[in-house]
């Protein structure tokens, strides 16, 4: 301790140039704490403002970064809410399309069933008309055959029953009948 007090006393007393010359103090314990104290004191005195300015600038940058982060966070939350709202709207529209799609499909299904029934009815009517036409045609063919057979039978009967004399009398009677008809028309 005595050494430390001597160091402070020696600070107040500067050796003059005449008595002692400039030299190095080799007492490490006496010189280092004094030098360090002076350097730290000078640094604190002059560096206090600079350090305070640096800390204030750093504090402002941190605060600005926090404000920007909060603004970005609020913007992200707003965008998230908008996206959720849009998602709900799209889901509602999708549900509506789904419901409308199902009802449209049911309508188209019913329309298809109805048109199929109508087509089947038309085909049934065409079939019945075709059957009636074919029946009528068959009846007409049968009538023609029956008529032809009856006619052939009558001709055979007439040819077998008729002899030449009866044949001439029938022709003459018909000629007389045609002649009378001609007189009436003239």
Image (spheres, helix red, strand yellow):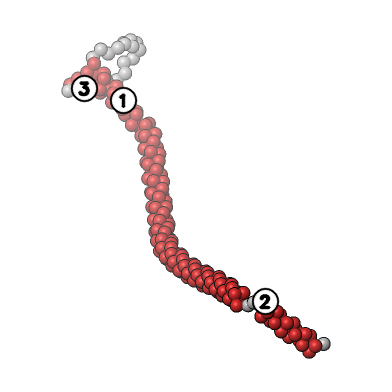
Residue 26 pos. (x, y %): 25, 12
Viewer-closest of 90 and 64: 90
Residue 96 pos. (x, y %): 42, 63
Which residue is labeled 2 in the image?
164
Q: Residues within 10 Å of mark 3 (few under 14, many from 20)?
A: some
Among all residues in the image, which is located at the extreme left?
1
Cα separation, mark 3 vs mark 1, equals 14 Å
Q: Is residue 184 left or right of residue 5?
A: right
Instruction: Name the residue at 34% across, 29% down.
Output: 43
Which residue is labeled 3 in the image?
4
Which corner quadrant holds the N terminus? top left
Instruction: Name the residue at 68% across, 79% down.
Output: 165
Among all residues in the image, which is located at the extreme bottom?
184
Q: Residues within 10 Å of mark 2 (few under 14, many from 20)?
A: few
- Whether the residues at callouts 3 and 2 have beta carbons within 8 Å, the answer is no
Residue 179 pos. (x, y %): 77, 85
Q: Using the rendered image of the protein, determine whether residue 144 is visible from the camera's viewpoint.
A: no
Mark 3 or mark 1: whose residue is earlier in sequence:
3
């Amino acid at each position: 301790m005595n050494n430390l007090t001597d160091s402070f006393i020696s600070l107040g007393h500067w050796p003059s140039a005449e008595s002692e010359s400039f030299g190095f103090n080799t007492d490490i314990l006496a010189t280092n704490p004094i030098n360090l104290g002076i350097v730290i004191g000078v640094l604190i005195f002059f560096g206090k403002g600079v350090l305070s300015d640096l800390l204030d600038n750093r504090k402002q940058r941190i605060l600005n970064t926090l404000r920007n982060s909060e603004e970005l966070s609020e913007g992200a939350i707003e965008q998230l809410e908008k996206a959720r709202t849009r998602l709900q709207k799209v889901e509602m529209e999708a549900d509506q399309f789904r419901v409308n799609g199902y009802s449209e499909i049911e309508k188209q299904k019913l329309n298809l069933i109805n048109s199929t029934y109508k087509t089947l009815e038309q085909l049934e009517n065409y079939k019945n008309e075709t059957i009636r036409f074919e029946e009528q045609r068959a009846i007409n063919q049968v009538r023609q055959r029956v008529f032809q057979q009856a006619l052939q039978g009558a001709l055979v009967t007439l040819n077998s029953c008729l002899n030449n004399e009866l044949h001439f009398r029938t022709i003459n009677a018909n000629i007389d009948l045609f002649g009378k008809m001609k007189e009436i028309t003239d």
